[in-house]
Image: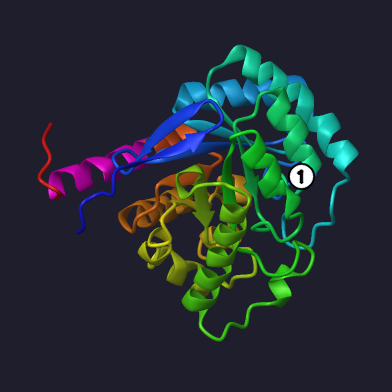
């Protein structure tokens, strides 16, 4: 097992160490139609309360999204995203010093949410949807996560044929990194995400999890989002909200293969999983400090 690659992720207001302790990004969907918790946190007060609860449970950052990107979903307007997001971002910023991420493909949404107090942007399109988003992040010294996805959420699950899965996904993420760099964003302000479930079969998800080090070689932190996704229900057939145990297995696989940040719904439970995996890595690397 390789020793951890210790480094820092820079976001708008500071830096976060990566490599020693797995970081958890808690999910707050401010939407009526997300695949596992749609409607639960559409009310701003409910979203704010849930975000604070996830921080107490052990989240290192909160990812706020106002546009469902489940398979088959349609876009949400910029105006509606901002209506849902801005009160939540502002209040969480007032109530907490935590890292706030906004899950959006829109440069305008990113700009206004960063101005309201967000620290980073999580773009599932890998800067394909709105290339100006990289300029916004650079101008505001924000962190940026770029993910691999084929097509759009409405079409992605019809595009599962790859010439070479790992090479194709890596090449796409390399392009996203170059676009970010061209706007002035350095690698230490980037996270890269192979996009589990976004134009991937169940088997392809596992292949990506087993080869995360290939993405770490791009020089940025690796973000992975297995939480409650369809492949975690392959055997249990349980609904999304009841897939915490199978998600825990995917989280452990991710950590042991090099993930730096895990985007999850069930922070308290998965913090325990991450802590055990981190302790295992520490002992195996011979570090007993």
In the displayed structure image, the side of residue 24 where residue 159 appears, left or right: right
Q: How is the image coloured?
A: rainbow
For residue 134, above or below residue 27: below
User: For mark 1, what is the residue?
Assistant: 107
* Residue drawn at x 56%, y 30% as measured from the top left: 12
Residue 36's x, y, as percent?
A: 67, 46
Residue 88's x, y, as percent?
A: 72, 24
In the displayed structure image, the side of residue 89 where residue 261 appears, left or right: left
Q: The magenta stretch spans which residues?
A: 272-284
Q: Is residue 166 in view?
A: yes
Q: Main secondary structure of the magenta part?
A: helix
Q: Secondary structure at mark 1?
A: helix
Q: Nearer the viewer, residue 182 or 149?
A: 182
Residue 275 magenta-drawn?
A: yes
Q: Nearer the viewer, residue 37 or 242?
A: 37
Q: Is residue 202 in view?
A: no
Task: Point out the residue furthest to the top here.
Answer: 95
Residue 24's x, y, as percent?
A: 46, 38
* Residue drawn at x 13%, y 31% as measured from the top left: 289
* Residue drawn at x 11%, y 35% as measured from the top left: 288
């Amino acid at each position: 097992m390789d020793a951890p690659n210790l480094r820092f992720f820079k976001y708008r207001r500071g830096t976060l160490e990566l490599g020693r302790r797995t970081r958890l990004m808690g999910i707050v969907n401010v939407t009526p139609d997300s695949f596992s918790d749609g409607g639960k946190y559409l009310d701003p007060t409910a979203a704010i309360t849930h975000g604070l609860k996830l921080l107490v449970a052990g989240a290192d950052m909160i990812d706020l999204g106002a546009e469902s990107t489940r398979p088959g979903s349609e876009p949400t307007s910029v105006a509606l995203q901002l209506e849902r997001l801005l009160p939540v971002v502002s209040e969480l910023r007032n109530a907490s010093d935590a890292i706030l991420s906004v899950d959006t493909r829109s440069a305008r949404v990113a700009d206004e949410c960063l101005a309201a107090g967000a620290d980073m942007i999580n773009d599932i399109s890998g800067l394909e949807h709105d290339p100006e988003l990289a300029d916004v992040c650079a101008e505001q010294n924000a962190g940026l996560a770029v993910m691999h996805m084929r097509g759009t959420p409405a079409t992605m699950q019809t595009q599962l044929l790859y010439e070479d899965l790992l090479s194709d996904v890596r090449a796409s993420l390399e392009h996203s990194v170059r676009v970010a760099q061209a706007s002035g964003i350095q690698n230490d302000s980037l996270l890269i995400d192979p996009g589990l479930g976004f134009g991937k079969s169940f088997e392809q998800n596992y292949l990506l999890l087993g080869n995360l080090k290939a993405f770490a070689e791009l020089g940025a932190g690796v973000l992975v989002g297995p939480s409650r996704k369809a492949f975690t229900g392959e055997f249990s057939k349980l609904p999304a909200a009841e897939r915490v145990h199978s998600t825990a297995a995917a989280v452990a696989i991710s950590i042991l293969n090099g993930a730096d940040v895990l985007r999850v719904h069930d922070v308290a439970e998965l913090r325990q999983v991450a802590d055990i995996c981190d302790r295992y890595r520490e002992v195996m690397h011979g570090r007993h400090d």
